[in-house]
Amino acid sequence: AYTEQLQAALDFIRGGSKFLVVAHVQPDGDAISSTLVVGWLLRQLGKQPVLINESAVPVRLHFMEATAGIINYSKQPPEEKFDRIISIDCADFRRIGLVKDCFAENAQLLNIDHHPTNDDFGSHNLIRTDAAATVEILFDLIEFAGIPLDNEAATAIYTGLLTDTGGFRYSNTTPRVMHIASVMLTEGVKGHWIANHLLEQMTKPQLLLLQRGLSRLTFSDDNQIAWLYVAFADMADTGAVGEDLEGLVNYALNVEGVEVGILFKETENGDVKVSMRSSGKADVSAIAQTFGGGGHVRAAGCRLEQGIQESVASVVQAVREALDK
Ligand code: 5GP
Ligand code: MN
Ligand code: MN
């Protein structure tokens, strides 16, 4: 069935000329890398891609030069409507965010994703939930189409794999991930430079934000749950930007004995964005789903329309119940 999905995806691409390519809001390394790979693939097939995202590309990913071509919807929303859409790394339609307003009424949508909670919202769906990253599925698609890689595509594929596997360390780091990474290195990708740039280096605001976050680290009585929060004012006070929050939740999970780590981030309008990470004992995607979010067993998130204290109380309680089951 996967081969049929690959064929249908290729037919969808071959059957159109202009495509709007969009990944999820607040894009991570896989979302941006996938956007670039789809853009690259469309160009190889003689198509016209328009790359867009609701949010800005994280500064750290600017080393991939093609990111300069991704439209920031919040800054310059296009007036044009598109009737062929490719969404990537989005588990559900809501993850596309405001970019949905660029879709024509009868738009056809190819949904390419690896999240187990994906609800097949596309008119066409290319989903493989055992893929470590959406770029892994795109590698399959490129291979299936018989298109030779170049350094630009290989760098984006490698970056998506590196970031979604936490530097080839998470449980989704399969033999196939390592095989694809190896092929990308053979293409000349500078793996050591990308790893240092994305995983080792920190900006000063990022470290100051970490300092504040860690000062609020709290544990449940049995130490199985650890959480921390970042207030909206912390961002301005430290000079940190949204992308500097990435990885913060891992400090909670990485404490010995902790089964679930949680980061609560207050947003500008007072809502709270929740990031959950699990050792595997509790399925945090199921917990996130009860709050209208989603994700994976070991990494999931949701957004709550209530304050930090209420959010902490309700989410920690839900995690408690999941662990006690
Ligand atoms: P993060 O905690 O890094 O924002 O997200 C972890 C995982 O949960 C990602 O795979 C992401 O796709 C998913 N996720 C995070 N927030 C949401 C949300 O609000 N809704 C859904 N459906 N998934 C989310
Ligand atoms: Mn993602
Ligand atoms: Mn992903």
Image (cartoon, rainbow, N blue to C red):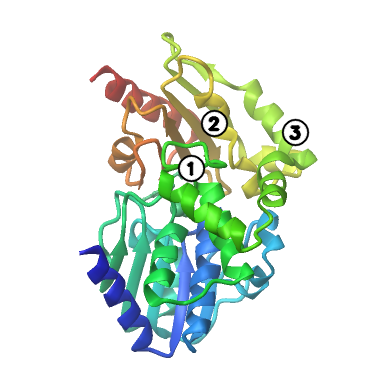
Q: Amino acid at mark 1?
A: Lys
Q: Is mark 3 within 8 Å of ligand 1?
A: no
Circle number at residue 273: 1
Q: Nearer the viewer, residue 180 or 76?
A: 180
**The C terminus lies in which quarter of the figure?**
top left
Give above or below for 230 relative to 219: below
Q: Nearer the viewer, mark 2 or mark 1?
A: 2
Q: In the rendered view, would you say 292 is above or below 99?
A: above
Observer-side mark, 3 or 2, equals 2
User: Is disc 2 in contact with disc 1, using a CB cutoff of under 8 Å?
Assistant: no
Left or right of 12? Residue 76 is right
**Circles 3, 2 touching at the beta carbon (< 8 Å):** no
* Residue that numbered label 3 is attached to: 208
User: For the point 66% across and 42% down, which residue is it?
Assistant: 199
Please give the residue where the numbered disc 2 appears in the rendered image: 250
Horizontal placement of 304 versus 230: left or right?
Answer: left
| Identity, as a three-letter code, of the amino acid under mark 3 | Leu
Ranked by sequence position, the earlier of labels 3 and 1 is: 3
Displayed quadrant of residue 280 = top left
Above or below, comparing residue 278 to residue 106 in the picture:
above
In front of the other: 276 or 215: 276
Of marks 3 and 2, which one's residue comes earlier in the chain? 3
